[in-house]
Image (tube, grey):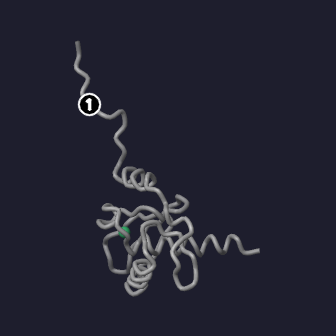
Amino acid sequence: MSRSPQVPARVPNVLEAIFLDASGRKETEAAGVLWRGHRIPAPGFSAETLERLIERGFDEGVYLASTGCPGTFHVTRPGSSSMHTASRSACSCPAGRLGKPCKHRALVCLALTVIDLRLRKP
Ligand SMILES: [Zn+2]
């Protein structure tokens, strides 16, 4: 009789694991966090945290680049060798991996809100 080790049928890669964890999180902020008069859907952020992290991202020149996957961006800043992958609900940075709000995700939430507003424009 052969032994059957306790190995999962499929081991997700690192990014999949991050996004799978995040997607399981309940988005209680469906109405969004108020930021300068705009509702920004930003799971896990308070208004103060969103403001602070967006400002930090702006100050550092953080920018987003397409991953080719809707709603997900590569996030980096000039002169940095690190690049993180972020969506509205997850980020690959150290804070994001712990499920904490980060500047990468704050800027993605802002960008997705702006994109959504532009798409709705008549
Ligand atoms: Zn991050």
Residue type at mark 1 is: Gln
Give the left or right position of residue 27, taking residue 80 as reference: right
| Residue 83 on image: x %, y % | 36, 68
In-front residue for pair 30/81: 30
Q: Eyeballing the image, is 118 above or below 91? A: below
| Residue 6 on image: x %, y % | 26, 30
Q: Mark 1 highlights which residue?
A: 6
Q: Residue at x 38, y 70 (%)?
A: 101
Secondary structure at numbered mark 1: loop
Residue density around tag 1, few if under 14, some if 14–19, many if 20 or more, within 10 Å? few
| Residue 72 on image: x %, y % | 49, 62
**Which residue is outermost to the top?**
1
Q: Residue at x 48, y 69 (%)?
A: 42
Quadrant of the displayed image that contains ligand 1: bottom left
Q: Residue at x 53, y 69 (%)?
A: 41
In-front residue for pair 26/69: 26
